[in-house]
Image (cartoon, grey):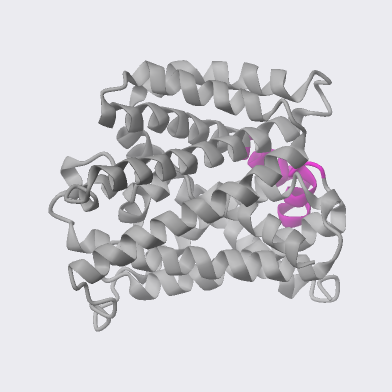
Amino acid sequence: MWAAGLKWMFLILATLIGAGYASGREIWQFFGYESGLAIIIFTILFTICSYVILHISFTERSTHYFPVLERLVGKKLAAVYDVLIVFYLFTVTVVMIAAGGATGTMYQIPNWLGILFITLMIILIFTSNVEGVVSMNSYILPILVGGLVLVLVIYTRHEQINLLQDWREQANWQSAFPFTALNILPVVAVIGAIGKQMKGKGELWIASIGSGLIIGALTYLYNNDLMHISHAIPHYDIPLFYILKNYPSIVLIGISIVLWLAIYTSAVSGVLGIVSRFQTKWKGPLWLQAAVLVLLMLPLTQLGFTDLIALMYPIFGFANLYILSAILVYPILNRYKMK
């Protein structure tokens, strides 16, 4: 039970901790000053939503996300959100691939070469089955989360940042809702693909509570460090690199690898959500479906990492508020089915 629960937990975290999040750009887009309460609300909302989605996927024994959508919003709206999810996953994966190029430029690696490398690595992982993609996260995510936490804790201690600052003013509390809505849609997409693999409800509790607490604590810690460097954020595509600018080069290289892993796992999760949705309609090999999909994305990567996040993430966050509401009221309307 614990092993399976942790596997689903890492899969959920893989959908969240992509380039936008790991770089700090996505967190600053929604939070910043006066956001401590917002992050606590986000943690609670995300934990509840993760459990509801896992429960529906487990009950439906789903292999893609559409049955989960139907249970949440009905057949008619499910068709609308089906299109929105595909568009969202497509766009976010474009952002991840663009970020793969942006990360390489820190080391004078041409942007196109970084994009080509991450593209080939995405296709390569899909030469295994869905179980192989899920298992990959079990190995990569502890390294990713551990690396981020280590850097942020060291920076917090070095700069003597007060983690309890800014609690008398909490004007930004409402940002918890669009931020949760933004992050819950990919969870619906990815978790919907593995419902048939779940064995018991204990796994659902471990995955939902674990992922909620980890992402909540990490977001709070990261946001405090970002407030400390707010003056520099407009000048950096990846604010995390400003935090690291005075560290030894070996640390910068290590965190660059961690950041690239975040980009990679998020991109893989996005592609998994899309190919699992259309796998029943196209019987070709999984890697070929992934290859065609990623090749269609490549021209859009030239729009730029920062511009894509600034434009698309707030739009998706507010567009998804309805499905967030549907997830939150689902346990009330279906309290007997949830037992």
Judge whether residue 128 can be spotted in this image: yes
In the image, 99 versus 63, the foreground residue is 99
* Region of the chain picked out in magenta, as a range: 63-85
Q: What residue is shown at x 79% (from left), y 54% (from top)?
A: 57
Which one is in front, 140 or 226? 140
Q: Is residue 70 found inside the magenta-colored segment of the image?
A: yes
Quadrant assignment, res 227: bottom left
Q: Which residue occupies 34% across, 28% down? A: 104
* Left or right side of 20 for 275: right
Quadrant of the rendered image containing residue 122: top right
Q: Residue 104, relative to residue 224: is it above or below? A: above
Q: Is residue 13 above or below residue 77?
A: below
- The residue shown at (22%, 48%) is 248
Say whether residue 135 is left or right of residue 234: right
Res 182 visible: no
Q: Position of residue 118 (x, y in %)?
A: 49, 26
- The image shows residue 277 at horizontal and vertical percentages of 74, 34
Labels in figure, total: 0
Q: Residue furthest left?
A: 231
Specify whether residue 324 is painted magenta: no
Identify the residue at horizontal 61%, vertical 40% (top origin).
269
Percent position of residue 333, x then y: 76, 71
Magenta stretch, main secondary structure class: helix
Q: Up-down: is 258 above or below 54?
A: above
Quadrant where the N terminus is found in the figure: bottom right
Residue 288 placement: quadrant:
top right
Name the spot of residue 54 as percent of width and height, x first: 73, 60
Q: Quadrant of the C terminus?
A: bottom right
In the image, residue 240 sits, relative to residue 328, either above or below, namely above
